[in-house]
Each structure stands twice: as structure tokens, then as C-alpha cells.
Image: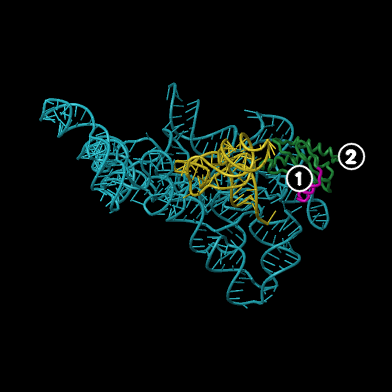
Chain colours: A green, B cyan, C yellow
RNA sequence: CGAGCGGGCUGCGCGGCCGCGGCGUGCGAUCAGAGCACGAUGAGGAAAGUCCGGGCAUCACAGGGCAGGACGCCUGAUAACGUCAGGUGAAGGCGACUUCAAGGAAAGUGCAACAGAAAUAGACCGCCUGCCGAAUCCCUGUUUUUGCAGGGUGCCCGCGGGGAGAGAUCUCCGCGGCGGCGGGUAAGGAUGGAAAGGCGAGGUAAGAGCUCACCGACGGGACGGUAACGCCCCGUGCCAUGUAAACCCCGUCCGAUGCAAGUUUGGGCUUCGUUCACAGAGGGCUGCCCGUCCGAGCGAAGCCGUGAAUAACGCUCGAGCCUAUCGGCGACGGUAGGCCUAGAUAAAUGGCCGUGCCAGACAGAACCCGGCUUACAGGCCCGUCUCGGAGG
RNA sequence: GGGGGCAUAGUCUCAGUUGGUUAGAGCGCGCGCUUCACAUGCGCGAGGUCACAGGUUCAAGUCCUGUUGUCCCCA
């Protein structure tokens, strides 16, 4: 799971510049095919104070974790949309929907 | 029973599955890593605001003066403090108790709008009193002014008594009013945050600390207390308002910068230097001055930019925590025993299910401590505590 | 993480003296005049919890303390 962290600043800016953007009800997902799978979450100050921001990041990581194993190698940014309430279920459902639509998930066992 | 006051504690619990941070052990084994398994461990009372105080680090071993800043009843605690404890005083509350940046306004300067007669100082009204009823007022001239001269307007009202006169009326005295001028006074006066100690009595023409009692103020002395201060006695007739979170004075304290401090390792370029001495420029040490250091020994300084806005160290054992005991009213300190309790770097604590009354407030470590301040759902405990009601 | 600044009318730009009684100016907005009409010009007018909460003072936009928002700097 450690290897999934996307840290390099230039990687993030490259993904933001030339990656493909997918929109869902609760979040925006940006991805760029790469040799290794890595992801990052974007939660700035506009989402609230530190406790609230940390909570959003945890929910996003937890939701993405469920799909990481089956993902084709690419770099992914997760950007939530500002709203009153956040939940694990909504994030998980939307990530699954977006990844399935782009056919990024390998058929497990195929 | 009701309403309060003060103090303290806690800050969802349990079970299951999946997942995260660094650490240890083992496996693994590379150019360097990584990865896997197991184990214990992993946010707060405020981690927050960054308002104070320290440690620590660099600048110089932390220097002198000015400027600047902070604090301000007393005593103590402490590494230190603007914090804490115990007291003093003042204000508030029936009370338990609470609150207070609480030195100096006779060292000096500034400010005090509006209102009000008057604002740090006085006489507008009023009160009392003396003289007067062309008192006065207006104009002109003159004079430094007071004033003087001339002209004009104009000669107060009521009551009582006496006198003169035939009467109309005139005149004198007393009292009162009205008015004019002068003097006394600071009792009273619509204001104001503040009005020349307060209140009562005596006193007086009216008044006034003018005199007296009480209270207050000021000065001196005795006693108690380490002290702030308290209390008592004596004296002074009483005199200078407020503001120092205005400048200021007095006392105490403060070097600057802050872990993005700073330390370690490697590359390139430029500049300086010629080993001593002197001088000048520059830079650092604080805003200024002084003073001082650097400017070297084959190095130094500056810049660039790569590793690298992903290196390592600093980075967690510390004025540490827990228990017992002793000293102290207490803050706190001593002794003994025990314990090791996050160290991340886009940054770790979450998700789902079950369950317990309710879906659980404020909120997330970033070098570390001591405080302060601010935010906070709910729950629990303590007290010879206070007030009110009822019963015995 | 650490250090520092700012907040006054309408998401505008700013004054406001040593605390003093009515918080002003420009642009904008509204109305009227001018024009055939518009622009310009002229006149009049509205519009303020001085970011919020306490305190000092007789009196606070101003002084002090806390809170909130916003901006800048530091490897």
C-alpha cells in the first residue's frame, strides 16, 4: 500500500495538465496512465479545519483502497467536491462508477 | 425540597473484519531500495490562538550608553513569567462568595466638548446692608483715564402719622414695595462625570469651619504585623477636581533572531588575499552611537545551481509521569520506589457490522516545557458551604 | 510550523489631527435640469452595527485586551 502514494510535485502537475478528468456527484477524478499505480488526494483549506480535512482524506483513501488492487497502472488524483456531508459509501460508489466507465479495472481472475 | 456558591474528575464503552504511521524481531536480499510475516505501540484538555515566560540553537564569552518595550498593593512559590498561592485594600451580592493593569496627579506638561452664572476658576441671579429717587439715560466738547463742562428727555408707587394752607395742594417723618449705585456673602440656584469636605446644631445683618459634635481628609505618635496595612490616641478648620489602558516620573526587568533556528556531506563559477604592520571601504553583532569581531592560510567569502521545494541530524529521557511519605495554610519543595509514554514530512487513529438508553461536544501533535486566553454535548463526585420553605 | 500587517458607505478607492459630540471625499447609485435623444455638464438626495465582544474614560472609529476574517514574509 505504501507504493501507492503519489508524492512528486512534477508528477502531480503533469497529471493535472494532461490527465483525463472524470466527474461524479461527490468528487472529481484525474488519471494519467503510468508504469506504477499511485494516487493522491487534494483537500485544501476550503474544506474546513484540520479535523474535517483529515477526515475527508481518510474517507477518500479508504474508498480508493477497495479498487487499487484491480487497477491498471496509472496515476490518480482524487478531488472531492465541497458539500455539507461526506460519506465513505458515496465516495466508494462514485469511484467504482468512474473507473468502470473508463474500463480501467482489470477483470479479476481473467 | 427548592435556588445557589466553590472545588475536582471524565471527554463514548465492548466485540469482529479490513486498513494506516514509525519502532523491534525474523524472512528476504539489491547498484540503491523495496516487499512480506509477527509483536507491542500510536493525538488533546484544550494538541488551538501564538498572548507571555523559559530551555535549546546561531550570531561574539552576550559588552557599555541612548532610544525602545514590558510590568506595577504586599509576602512567598518558581528555571522564569505578565503565571500561581496566601494575604491587604476597593467595588458588588441578604449570604456562601465573586471581581479588580490596585505605584505616583503638592515634579512638570497636555486635555476636560456640550450644558451651565461659574470648570480649576468666580460673582449672573439670589440673600443681607449703606446711600439715593436725576438716582440715571441720551447727545456734544474736552481729558491718558477717573472725570469735568454744556444741552436734551425726565423728577417712582402705596399705607400710616405730623405740620402749613380756605381749599386744590405742598412739605417732613416712619414702614413697605419698585428702581439706581456701592459694599458684604458663598447658605440656595434648571447644568454637568466632576461645583471649593458632608450632615446637624450654634452663630450672624445675611452668611461662612466662623464655632462645636459625628463622619471624612491631612499631619504626628503608640501598638500589632516580615510587609501591604489595620487599630487607637493627639493635633490641624480643611488647602491644589478628574484623566497616567495621555505624555510623563519612580521602581523592577528585557541583546537579537527563531527548528523554515541551526549542524553534517558533495559540485561549479566568481571575488579577495599574499602570509608582517598601517589606513580605508564592506559585512556581522539591535534602531542609533561606542566598542568589538570577521577580512585566512592555502584557504576564505559570495553567488549559482544539482542531489533536493523526496538527504541525514536537530527529533524526543524531560524543570518527565505515577505511587507512597515528610515539611508547608497553600502554590510548591524534599525523600523513597516504580515507569518509558507519538515523532510524522502532501503528513499516521479510519471504514463497515453487531451491541449498550441517544450516534457521542469542542476539536488533530509538527523542537520541547511552564502558564494565560479562547472553544466545548453530556455525565459523575466532593463540601461541619450559603439562602429560602416545610417537618421533627 | 514561525514572524508581521490590515479591517471605515455599494463585495469600489481611501481621509478622519492629541479621544470631544454631525464620521467625510472621489467613483458608483437614485431623482431633477440641460438635449430631439444619448453621453458630457449642473443641482439635489439616499446610503454606515466604523469587522465582532468586553474594558479604561464623563465621553472610544481613535486607547487596552480577547475573538473573527483577510493579506504578506521566512528553507
- The chain under label 1 reads A
Measure the alpha-carbon separation of dots 1 and 2: 28 Å
Pick whichever of labels 1 and 2 is earlier in the sequence.
1
Kindly report the secondary structure that dominates the magenta region of the rendered protein. Answer: helix
Residue C58 placement, left or right of A109: left
Say which of B107 and B337 sits in front: B107
Q: Which mark is residue A107?
A: none
Residue B249 placement, left or right of B305: left
Residue A56 is inside the magenta segment:
no
Circle 1: is it few (<14), some (14-19), or many (20+) Cα within 10 Å? some
In the image, residue B65 lies at what x, y percent? 48, 63
Q: Quadrant of the N terminus of chain A?
A: top right
Residue B124 placement, left or right of B44: left
Q: What SS does tag 2 mark?
A: loop
Q: Which residue is mark 2?
A: A110
Q: Quadrant of the C terminus of chain A?
A: top right
- Give the quadrant of residue B191: top left
Q: Which mark is residue A40?
A: 1
- The chain under label 2 reads A
In the image, residue A96 lies at what x, y percent? 81, 37
- Give the quadrant of residue B41: top right
In the image, residue A88 lies at what x, y percent? 74, 36
Q: What SS does tag 1 mark?
A: strand
Say which of B77 and B268 sits in front: B268
Say which of A24 and B383 sits in front: A24
Q: What span is colored magenta in the figure? A: A1-20
Q: Is B141 drawn above or below residue B66 in the view shown?
A: above
Name the residue rendered at 70%, 35% in the picture.
A85
Q: How many marks do you count on the picture?
A: 2
In the image, residue C7 lies at what x, y percent? 59, 44
Amino acid at each position: 500500500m505504501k507504493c501507492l502514494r503519489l508524492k512528486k510535485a512534477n508528477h502531480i502537475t503533469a497529471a493535472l495538465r494532461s490527465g483525463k478528468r472524470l466527474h461524479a456527484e461527490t468528487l472529481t477524478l484525474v488519471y494519467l496512465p503510468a508504469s506504477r499505480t499511485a494516487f493522491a488526494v487534494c483537500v485544501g483549506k476550503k474544506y474546513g479545519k484540520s479535523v474535517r480535512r483529515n477526515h475527508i482524506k481518510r474517507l477518500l483513501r479508504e474508498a480508493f483502497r477497495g479498487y487499487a488492487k484491480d487497477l491498471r497502472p496509472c496515476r490518480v488524483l482524487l478531488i472531492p467536491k465541497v458539500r455539507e456531508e461526506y460519506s465513505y459509501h458515496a465516495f466508494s460508489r462514485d469511484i467504482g462508477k468512474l473507473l468502470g466507465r473508463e474500463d480501467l479495472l482489470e477483470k479479476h481472475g481473467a
